[in-house]
Image: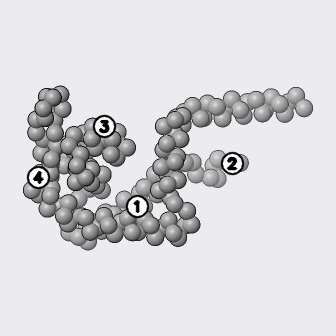
Amino acid sequence: MDPKQHPGLGELLRYVNELVEHGAEEHYRAMRLDYRARYTPVLRALKAGAQTVTDITERTRLTQGAISQTVALLEGDGLVSRHAVDDGRKSGIRLTAAGRTLVAKLERHWTATFAAIGNLEEEIGYPLRRALEAAAEALEREGFSARVSIAKTQNTKQGDAHVDE
């Protein structure tokens, strides 16, 4: 197989992500919202009861760094505020009044988004979200770097076997 003729996994994932985010951004503009798609997982997690960056990280599977950056942007836009929590080591995060108003506007959009995902999965004939969840779980068990190392070792052994034949 010629790798130059077939896109890699990362390339395909980035491209699909760009297509999805571009479509989402179009809808936010149509809704007359000054909104960043990266806010969605954080806002949905807060609406579902998350109260700290750690809570959001556990609910979203995004990195703590990405969540912290997004929370800082949300705070700068006046959509969330931080407050002290009991143990003092973390700060709590809550939606502001503007954040609650925005989430109320977005809920219908999010429902439509999940319906669109379902339609996409039906069109392509397999559950894309489940496939991505399974890939994430497999990569959590054994990282991609380790998998590449194993593949290199196997390719080297196969090449040695062909030389011996």
Label at residue 78: none
| Residue 142 occupies quadrant | top right
Q: Which tag, 4 or 2, sits closer to the chain's start?
A: 2
The Cα–Cα distance between marks 4 and 2, rounded to whole angstroms, is 53 Å
The residue indicated by pointer 3 is 64
The Cα–Cα distance between marks 3 and 4, rounded to whole angstroms, is 21 Å
- Decide if residue 77 is in sight here: no
State the image coordinates of residue 121 (x, y, percent, origin top left). Answer: 50, 65
Q: In terms of secondary structure, where does tag 3 sit?
A: helix
The residue indicated by pointer 4 is 96
Q: In terms of secondary structure, where does tag 1 sit?
A: helix
**Residue 149 drawn above or below residue 102:** above
Q: What's the residue type where badge 3 is placed? A: Gln
The residue indicated by pointer 2 is 2
Closer to us: mark 4 or mark 2? 4
Closer to us: mark 1 or mark 2? 1
Closer to us: mark 1 or mark 4? 4
The residue indicated by pointer 1 is 20
**Residue 101 drawn above or below residue 43:** below
Q: In terms of secondary structure, where does tag 2 sit?
A: loop
Q: What's the residue type where badge 4 is placed? A: Thr
Task: Give the residue at x 29% y 67%.
Answer: 109
- Label 2 Cα crowd, 10 Å radius (few <14 / some 14-19 / many 20+): few
The Cα–Cα distance between marks 1 and 4, rounded to whole angstroms, is 28 Å
Q: Which tag, 2 or 3, sits closer to the chain's start?
A: 2
State the image coordinates of residue 108 (x, y, percent, origin top left). Answer: 26, 68
Closer to us: mark 1 or mark 3? 3
**Residue 29 drawn above or below residue 43:** below
Q: In terms of secondary structure, where does tag 4 sit?
A: loop
The Cα–Cα distance between marks 1 and 2, rounded to whole angstroms, is 28 Å
Task: Give the residue at x 25% y 64%.
Answer: 107
Q: Which tag, 1 or 3, sits closer to the chain's start?
A: 1
